[in-house]
Amino acid sequence: MKKYICTVRAIITETYELEDEFEISAPDEVQAGDDAVTAAENSSLDTWLQHPNAHPNMRDVVDIETDFVLEDTEEKIIEDGEPLVKK
C-alpha cells in the first residue's frame, strides 16, 4: 500500500464575548442605547482585542469552530530501504 505525506491546515475560530461601558449623552434611554452600539461599532478592533477580558487566560470562550483544509499531498516512495518523499 502506498504512503502519503499530507499537509493539513487547521482553522480554529473562538467566539467570546466582551463587555465595556460607554458614557453617552442623549435625550432618552433608547437613543442612548442606539448611540452606545454605534460607538462600539466605530471603536477600533484593537480596542476590543486589548480589553483585559480578551486575554487568552481571561476570556470565556462560548463557541469553538474548526475547519480543516488539505494543503498538499505527496507520495512517499521507498528506495533502497530508505523512505523518501517524492517532490
Image (spheres, rainbow, N blue to C red):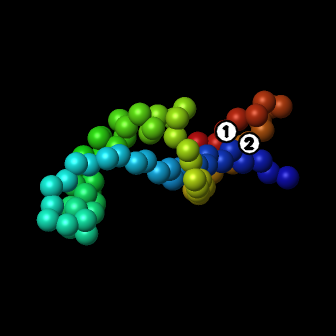
Mark 2 crowd level (few <14, some 14–19, many ≥20, 10 Å Cα): some
Is 17 left or right of 5, judged from the image as shown? left
x and y percent of residue 50 in the render?
Answer: 35, 35
Q: Residue at x 52, y 40 (%)?
A: 59
Q: Residue at x 27, y 54 (%)?
A: 40
x and y percent of residue 70 in the render?
Answer: 59, 55
Dots 2, 1 in contact, CB < 8 A: yes
Q: Secondary structure at mark 1?
A: strand
x and y percent of residue 4 in the render?
Answer: 72, 48
Q: Residue at x 25, y 57 (%)?
A: 36
Q: Which residue is mark 1?
A: 85
The amino acid on which the numbered mark 2 sits, given as a three-letter code, is Ile
Extreme front residue here?
28
Task: Looking at the picture, tell me which residue is in the foreground, 58 or 3.
Answer: 58
Q: Earlier in the sequence, mark 2 or mark 1?
A: 2
For residue 2, above or below residue 29 = above
Task: Looking at the picture, tell me which residue is in the foreground, 22 or 28.
Answer: 28
Task: Looking at the picture, tell me which residue is in the foreground, 83 or 69.
Answer: 69
Q: Residue at x 29, y 41 (%)?
A: 47
Quadrant in which residue 41 is drawn: bottom left
Q: Which residue is mark 2?
A: 77
Extreme bottom residue here?
30
The amino acid on which the numbered mark 1 sits, given as a three-letter code, is Val
Separation of marks 2 and 1 at Cα, in angstroms: 6 Å
Q: Secondary structure at mark 2?
A: strand
Is 84 left or right of 20, judged from the image as shown? right
